[in-house]
Image (tube, rainbow, N blue to C red):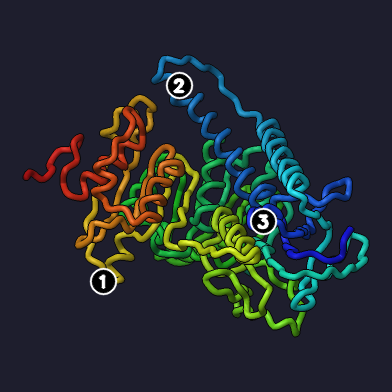
Amino acid sequence: MADKFDVIVIGAGPGGYVSAIRAAQMGLNAAVVEKWISDDGKPVFGGTCLNVGCIPSKALLEASHKFVEAKHDFDDMGIEASDVQMDVKKMMARKDKIVKNLTGGVAGLLKANGVTAIQGTGKVTGAKQVEVTDKGGKATTYDAGNIVIAAGSVPVEIPPTPLVDGMVVDSTGALEFQETPKRLGVIGAGIIGLELGSVWNRLGAEVTVLEAMEDFLPMVDGAIAKETQKLLKKQGLDIRLSARVTGSEVKGKEVVVKYTDSKGDQEITFDKLIVCVGRKPYTQGVIAEGVGVELDQRGFIHVDDQCRTSVPGIYAIGDCVRGQMLAHKASEEGVMVADIIAGHKAEMNYDAIPSVIYTFPEVAWVGINEQEAKAAGIEVKTGTFPFAASGRAMANNATEGMAKIIANAETDRVLGMHIVGQHAGEMIAQGVIALEFGSSAEDLALTCYAHPTMSEAVHEAALAVDGHAIHMANRKKK
């Protein structure tokens, strides 16, 4: 194995492996360092996303949703399905198979593109040096013309609820339950908490979500957040806001949780407890002292808009730098950095990064929301359209939710798109493209959409910005 590379990437998650592949495609001699290891001693690629995050959680979300459909919704369509049961262990085995296929696929992509995979824990020891320590403790130093830190993030732990194996778990542990708990507690009503809570709620658990913040999904447009909260409560999720957890104790096969809310001190008992209060950058031990790479108090690496750190030739991307902790954001940063290292001009539009919550219905958004526009003093006009008025939504038995577009009142330029509904995560791409190309609401309104589709709700929302929605009453007249 060569001991010198044009680019060494630390971390083979969705940011790291994509960056390494792109660098190789640009003609650079690239290597990727990964500490996760398989039983046969080989590196496991894909990071949190493929192994214990995005992909496995979506496998469980999809399986649990189909279970609910078969048990409760098929009858409306004339499909008789009696005595529907969920085999949780089989569901988990399917999830594991999907993960294995994808991580193996990444290994194949790296090999096909000529990327050298190095197993071990990577550490930046100099401006152009990376030290890799293997599972046996042997350290090897590699020279690099450029270094990309893509170390990712880890779940945040909080003192009131220390993890207890199998009883009090983080998001990773929640993906490994082999049976449905009768009473499940979730601390945190963010994206991860709502998704995991939805999975086990669908499978029969009594789910209580404790959220310290007063507002539900404050990062989401207010109208969309309100609708989402209503729909999730309708499904059986007990979401308690302004509930600050103060302690927990495992007693036998139960977890007793103490919290405070507007009524004072409270206590509730669960069979399992999931702690989902966010993630923090994994940067401790990744950069040696004296290298000169600047970090903030929370451990995030300081970078500019093109992911350059304070040391020339060292870049950082993904969860360990500013911005949203999203796999697709990390991947695009990885491509941008590889292109820059190869001598090309590259940049990212950080105003056009979509977010998705994969509950049912899904919640997706891009750009600013109405409350952010108001806080910034931007005068906007909005258009909304309910899926209840969509023919395809009726056919799909998915009439809950709405699409909303926010446009600049003066220029008509689209500033944000927000959707709660079936396939919202797919439809939000229209908003991303609209923001990327500086489209107006009128541009979307004058576009021909296929009928019947769920995406027609976006078309109607664009028409509604100026009061011209066709399939909704009380529109403006000219």
Q: Is residue 343 left or right of residue 399?
A: right
**Secondary structure under the numbered disc 1 in the rendered image:** loop
Q: Which residue is mark 2?
A: 74
- Name the residue type under label 3: Met
- Which mark is on residue 26? 3
Q: Which residue is mark 1?
A: 377
Say which of 175 and 9 sits in front: 9
Q: Is residue 161 left or right of residue 474?
A: right
Q: Residue at x 27, y 53 (%)?
A: 440
Q: Nearer the viewer, mark 2 or mark 1?
A: 1
Q: Nearer the viewer, mark 2 or mark 3?
A: 3
- Name the residue type under label 2: Phe
Name the quadrant containing residue 306. bottom right
Residue 470 drawn at (x, y percent): 18, 36
- Name the residue type under label 1: Gly
- Give the mark, 2 or 3, whose residue is nearer the N terminus: 3
Q: Is residue 180 left or right of residue 363?
A: right
Are the residues flagged by discs 2 and 1 in contact, CB closer than 8 Å?
no
Q: Residue at x 25, y 60 (%)?
A: 408
Q: Residue furthest bottom?
A: 290
- Give the mark, 2 or 1, whose residue is nearer the N terminus: 2
Residue 84 drawn at (x, y percent): 56, 22
- Which mark is on residue 471? none
Q: Residue furthest left?
A: 478
Q: Is residue 19 left or right of residue 136?
A: left
Q: Residues within 10 Å of mark 2 (few under 14, many from 20)?
A: some
Does 286 appear above or below 23? below
**Secondary structure under the numbered disc 2 in the rendered image:** helix
Say which of 20 and 419 sits in front: 20
